[in-house]
Amino acid sequence: MMIFGAVIVAALLVFIFRALSWTTHAPHWQMPHSGTGSAGLHVLDERYARGELNREEYLQKKRDILGG
């Protein structure tokens, strides 16, 4: 029974931590967009800097955004 309680407490701590981190880091889709695509490039640059994209993905998506 104590193991079950410990699992519940751990799950609650994880839930609280994730909820707090979600509110401090706004999702990218909420960023304002400009007509030039600069907001898209800014998001792309941030994702590349965080390591979410490799170089080939970054360059391909940049070409897609710029239309070239």
Image (cartoon, grey):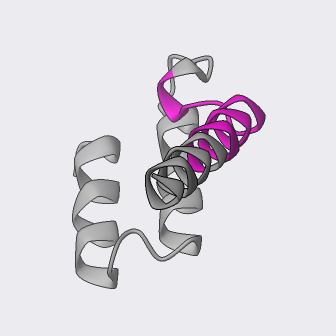
Q: Residue at x 47, y 38 (%)?
A: 40
Q: In this view, does 1 lie above or below 27?
A: below
**Could you tell me what secondary structure mostly forms the magenta stretch?**
helix
Query: What residue appears at the point 58 percent right and 50 percent down from the top-left corner?
Result: 14
The stretch in magenta equals: 14-29
Q: At 69% across and 46% down in the image, what residue appears?
A: 17
Q: Where is residue 50 in the image (x, y as percent from the top left)?
A: 56, 71
Report the number of numbered marks: 0
Q: Is residue 43 above or below residue 27?
A: below
For residue 38, side relative to residue 25 (left or right): left
Is 9 displayed left or right of 8 in the figure? Answer: right
Q: Magenta span has 23?
A: yes
Q: Is residue 27 left or right of residue 13?
A: left
Viewer-closest of 20 and 63: 20
Q: Residue furthest bottom?
A: 55
Q: Residue at x 59, y 40 (%)?
A: 12
Q: In this view, does 24 lie to the left or right of 63?
A: right
Instruction: State the image coordinates of residue 29 (x, y, percent, origin top left).
Output: 47, 25
